[in-house]
Amino acid sequence: MRINYTPWPEKDAEEFKSKGFWIDKELTDILCRQSGQRPESPAIISEDVTLSYRQLESYSDRLASYLSQRGLEAGDTALVQLPNDYPFYVVYFALLKLGVVPVNALFNHNKDELFHYADQLRPTLIIGDSTQALFSDSTFTDSLQQDLDLSFTLLIDGDRERSLRDTWLSDNDNEKSFPERQATPNEVAFFQLSGGSTGTPKLIPRTHNDYYYSIRQSVEVCQWDSDTRYLCALPAAHNFSLSSPGGLGVLYAGGTLILAKDPSPSTCFPLIEQHHVNWTALVPPAAILWLNAADNKAALASLRYLQVGGAKLSANLARRVEVELNVTLQQVFGMAEGLVNYTRLNDDAWTRHNTQGRPMSEADKVIVVDENNQPVSIGEEGLLTTSGPYTFRGYFNADAHNSHAFTEEGFYCSGDRVIQTETGHLIVVGRDKDQINKGGEKIAAEEIENHLLSHPDVFDAAVVSMPDDLLGERICAFVIAQPNGTTLKPVTLNKFMRGKHLADYKYPDRYELVDTFPKTKVGKVDKKSLRSQVEEKLASHKSSSRTSV
Ligand code: AMP
Ligand code: DBH
């Protein structure tokens, strides 16, 4: 099956090739070049396992051969959910080698998200990890298979079927017995996930050519090489930690990728010390936890650069990160849809602390526009629109949404409110999309509202962000009960929502039961006003608890 996606116009594609942005190679080239150049160098360290480039290549060959024997072939799709452990990359490369196109769910995604992805992609194959809650009991995968009429599920350490780990650990003379196929660098390599702002999570088709360019260019901007020792503490599948430059960037550069199960100081500090990590990436709340782990900073002696992105970092925290952790900060403002901005390693302190970086490529086009799609001046606030050699042209199977996610010129409207400086750096000042950014985790308000509306006693629901010292934002759900819905209480709603099996970060942190919603002039729910309402409540609560102490 050929996966349907919106390609770049022929003219643009030709330009990207002639300028050397697209090199007509598949992402498997990342591993192939290094397993040739430095076969015995350590590629991945995860707990007590160290894989060399040669091993990573041969493990993924063996897995690809096994999957091919089981009937998988180019054009099939897969739903994968794996934690931060080396099998994530073995599976990633094995599927690329076969031309099987996966979506990699984040490991905090729950049943609801996985059902949605599977529903959209109709995967031939599901791969999970039996040590993770969802895949530890077979009822979930059985129901997924039955409901969606999917083929089969494989587990890293399964007992029901041959465990996947055995396929690559067994000494197999016939390591590479899957069909050679013609490279298709303009086709979709895998689907990235969007935080989204609509009712259903959206899938982002990423082609070999575009994604490979974003990785190579990221490596260039960050000046990574074989001495880079990068700690991946955010979920491996996230666009930030996969490609900015992330796990794939280290492998491209020939460095060493060290995997952490989570970004807490207690997990990461010993790994940094033990493996002489010199780069890592965090979201702002994790950076705050690192700042607070004051007693153990000697462990960070080898760390030179700390990337922070996914959500806005305040200038004050930016300064503290550099001073207190003794690192150079790199702000990263990216999106799974494409465009990634970095502060440069030699940017001055003001730029590093106050901006979210500038586009990584000379070929990125960024136009900041007003509500009528007219460009605003440098220094003025507006909406970010962008196009370029690694910014996608359409969500998968979402024509209606695509028709307003892009301008007529094919620029993606990211929904971010930004100011562009004289130097081309961007300062993120707000958001025009109906989304909550809870410390880097994006939540589409509409998705949560739809779940609330399915409660029989809920008449209407409006979900907005509320400020939070650690996470930046949390979720507040304003709810109007049905006229006769007498017993509606926050605890009831909370219990009801938990039954929806959503990713943990999506549950509202606060419920406000109200009689009406404020409306804008055109009769829409005035979310700005709801945000101020809850903000005021929180502020007065804070000051009253302060006076009562
Ligand atoms: P997604 O589309 O789910 O990949 O999320 C990308 C969005 O995350 C961007 O459009 C921004 O809204 C937000 N984001 C990412 N990095 C930053 C950052 N450094 N500062 C502020 N917002 C960010
Ligand atoms: O938040 C993001 O999606 C993000 C942040 C930093 C991203 O996709 C990226 C870098 O590539």
Image (tube, grey):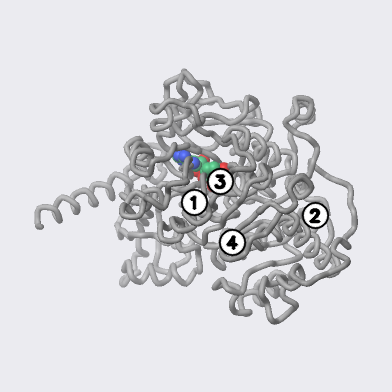
Is the C-beta of the residue carrying label 3 under 8 Å from the nearest atom of ligand 2?
yes
Q: Quadrant of residue 18?
A: top right
* Distance of label 1 from label 3 (alpha carbons): 19 Å
Dividing the image into 4 quarters, which one contains the N terminus? bottom right
| 298 relative position to 249: left or right | left
Pointer 4 or 3: first along the chain: 4
Does the image show residue 432?
A: no
Label 4 vs label 2, nearer the camera: 4
Identify the residue under disc 1: 444
| 167 relative position to 130: left or right | right
Q: Which mark is residue 387?
A: none
Query: Residue at the spot x=68%, y=48% of the render?
Result: 396
Identify the residue under disc 4: 46
Q: Ligand 2, what quadrant? A: top right
Query: Residue at the spot x=64%, y=29% of the render?
Result: 408
Q: Quadrant of residue 209?
A: top right
Q: Which mark is residue 240?
A: 3
Query: Residue at the spot x=54%, y=56% of the render?
Result: 235
Q: Amino acid at mark 3?
A: Phe
Q: Amino acid at mark 4?
A: Ser
Name the spot of residue 346 as percent of width and height, x first: 49, 27
Label 2 vs label 1, nearer the camera: 2
